[in-house]
Image: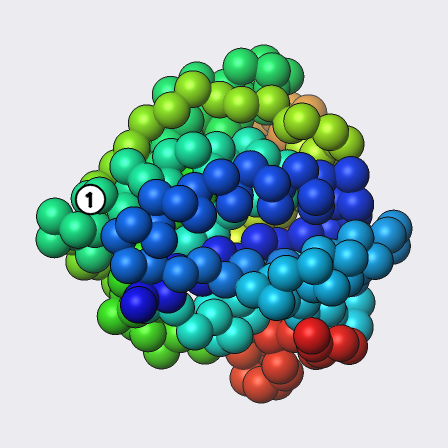
Amino acid sequence: MKLLSAVVPCYNEEENIADFYQEFMKNEAFFRENGVELELWYIDDGSRDNTVSEVKKLIEADERVHLLSFSRNFGKEAAIYAGLEKSNGDYVVFMDADLQDPPALLPEMYGYLDKGYDSVATRRVDRKGEPPIRSFFARVFYRLMRKISRTEIMDGARDYRLMTRKVVDAILSMPEYNRFSKGIFGWVGFDTKWLEFDNIERKKGETKWSFWKLFLYSIDGITAFSTVPLAFASVMGVLFCLGSFALIIFTIVRKAMFGDPTSGWPSLVCIISMISGVQLFCLGIVGQYLAKTYMEVKKRPIYLVKEEI
C-alpha cells in the first residue's frame, strides 16, 4: 500500500476542522481501491480558538489524524513547510481547512499522477464572492509576476496541489526563510497538470487574509522571485541623471543667449520633491531586498513546535 499525506494549515479554524475531515474521508474508498492509504496532518499555526481541541477529538477517533502545533503564529508558508517535513506519504497534497479546496477533486488529481505527471495543481477560473477591488489587484499581481519573473505562476493559482515524493523532496531542498510557495512550486519545475474549478466560498468562519496582508504577501513574492525591481531602480537613476544633465545644458545655453536665468521657485520645489520621492522609492526597493537578506543570514528556524501528536 502507498500513502497519501494531506497537509492542512489551520489558523482559528475550529468551525471547519470536523467538516473538512468528513469531506476528505469521503475519498477513502476510492484510494483504498487504488492501493493508497490516507493520513491527515493538521498544522496549527498558533490558533487562539479551539482548533487544537477539535483536532485532538479526531485523533482520539482516528489514528490516521496527526497534529503539529506551533508555539505562535508563524504564517501559512511556515505551516506548509512544516507539513512537508512531517508528511510520510508517497504523495502529498496541500489543502485549506475552510473547504475552498474541494476534496472531491482528489480522485481526478490522483488519476493524472497515475498517467505520469509529477504534480497536479489547481486554479480558480473566477473570484465569485471576493470584493471587486481585491480581485482586480490579484489579477494585476499575477500579470506582473508573469512579466518580471521566469517562474511560472498561474492567475488564480491555489496552494491546493497533489505532488509525488520527488517533488516534495525538491521543495524541501529549498529551506529558505522567506518563503513564497506559489513561486517555489513553479521554480522546481517537473511535469504539472493544471485543473480549473469555480471559486468556492468559505463554508464557515471568515478569511484571515486582509487586503493589507495580501499586499505584503505579494511584495514577498515579487522580491523572492524577481530582481526586476532592482533593475528598475537603477534605470530610474540613470534616466534622472541624464535628465539633470540635459537641464544643466539648457540652463547654460539659455543664460548665454538670452541672459535670463531660470526663474520660478514653485517649479524648482516640484522638481526637487519629485526627485526626492523617486530616490526614496528606489531606496525602499533596495531596502526590501536587504531586509530579506538580513533575515536569511540570521538562520532562524522557520517554525517552532509547541506540541506534536
Residue 233, how many percent across, how many down?
A: 43, 51
Residue at the image position 86 percent from the left and 52 percent from the top: 50
Please give the residue where the numbered disc 1 appears in the rendered image: 112
Residue 219, how many percent across, how many down?
A: 53, 48
Secondary element under disc 1, as helix, strand or loop, is helix
Residue at the image position 40 percent from the left and 61 percent from the top: 37
Residue furthest left in the image = 116
Looking at the image, which is closer to me, 93 or 252?
93
Quarter location, residue 145: top left
Looking at the image, which is closer to me, 211 or 193?
193
The vertical placement of 260 against 149, above or below, is above
User: From the image, which quarter does the N terminus lie in?
Assistant: bottom left
Q: Is residue 27 visible?
A: yes
Quarter location, residue 246: top left
Residue 10, how many percent across, how many down?
A: 68, 52
Looking at the image, which is closer to me, 172 or 17?
17
Looking at the image, which is closer to me, 153 or 288?
153
The vertical placement of 211 against 17, above or below, is above
Total label count? 1
Residue at the image position 20 percent from the left and 56 percent from the top: 118
User: From the image, which quarter does the C terminus lie in?
Assistant: bottom right
Residue at the image position 47 percent from the left and 70 percent from the top: 87
Kind of residue sitting beneath label 1: Tyr
Q: Is residue 99 left or right of residue 110?
A: right
